Image: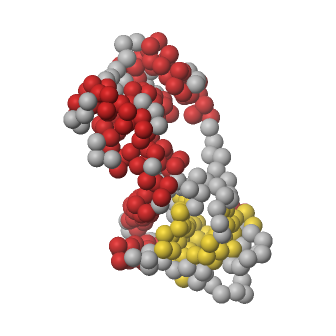
Amino acid sequence: MMFHVVTSGECLLEVDGAERCVLRPGDLALVPHGAGHRLMSAAGVTAGKLFDLPREAVSNRYEILRHGEGGAPTTMICALVRFDHPAAQRLIGLLPALIRVDTWQSPEMEWIQSTLRFIAAEAQQLNAGGETVITRLADILVIQAVRAWIAHAPAAQTGWLGALRDGQIGRVIAMIHRDPSRNWTVAALADSVGMSRSAFSARFTQLVGESAMRYAVRWKMQAALTQLQETDASLLELALRLGYDSDAAFSRAFKRIVGVTPGAARRHARVQVDNATEPSAG
């Protein structure tokens, strides 16, 4: 996920699949899905590929890029933020192509303005520990921007996101997420929130779009996929961690849900490259 913040001046942002918008100081723009996008000084300006432009390396993680001349100057902070947790990945998949947060729109956003100014100051100075400070603040900014979208966007009030906000079903989803290795039953989940099995099953399916048991198994397989990608644990080790008696039973369940064998998923992860479309600047 990329985000862009204008600290002085203004620019146009075009994101594939979203309307063009103007970014001014205090605006925070998120591009959640790695979609191709263009940052321009004015409409009609040809935007070159960002990674083809000259840059000044400040550290292993930070660079300064200067581009263009003659026009009114604009200063921006651009960053790439990665979230590996399966719940975060699912949430990001539900976000729109562009989220623009106007930090001037309500008093509850005032702290973001201060945070943006602090990041800008750290980026200019990069004192000892500055990289860590910027990284942590960037994570917080992105999380808060997504929370603001969830709180106000109509699209976030239904489906999986709406279910998370439900007092009973949201608690059940959190339980499943916290303990993917447990072999959940409808009875156990329903009892945990004081509902009958029939009422619970109907409400869960209505809000989430699938049964509680299928959701629990899919979440278990998502946890397995993450471990396949990030660890060298054997299939038997993963099977036992996730509540299966054998690697064969685990492999059958994994292929049924994911569509490929665990071994194929691990091999694919090791050769996979980042296919996100790079941004352009003009």
Determine whether 42 is above or below 222 in the image.
below
Q: How many numbered discs, if any?
A: 0
Percent from the top left, x then y, of residue 166? 33, 47
Quadrant of the image for the C terminus? bottom right
Q: Give left or right: position of 33 versus 233.
A: right
Decide which of 185, 54 is in the foreground and name it. 185
Determine whether 126 is above or below 197 in the image.
below
Decide which of 211, 226 is in the foreground and name it. 211
Colour scheme shown: secondary structure
Percent from the top left, x then y, of residue 126? 44, 71
Quadrant of the image for the N terminus? bottom right
Percent from the top left, x then y, of residue 86? 44, 40
Residue 211 falls in which quadrant of the image? top left
Give the residue displayed 77% in from the left and 75% down from the top.
Answer: 44
Is residue 26 visible in the rendered structure shown here? yes
Q: Give left or right: position of 113 versus 80.
A: left
Give the residue displayed 54% in from the left and 76% down from the top.
Answer: 6
Percent from the top left, x then y, of residue 229? 50, 33
Give the residue displayed 59% in from the left and 57% down from the top.
Answer: 97
Give the residue displayed 40% in from the left and 12% down from the top.
Answer: 246
Q: Give left or right: position of 179 versus 263.
A: left
Is residue 174 visible in the rendered structure shown here? no
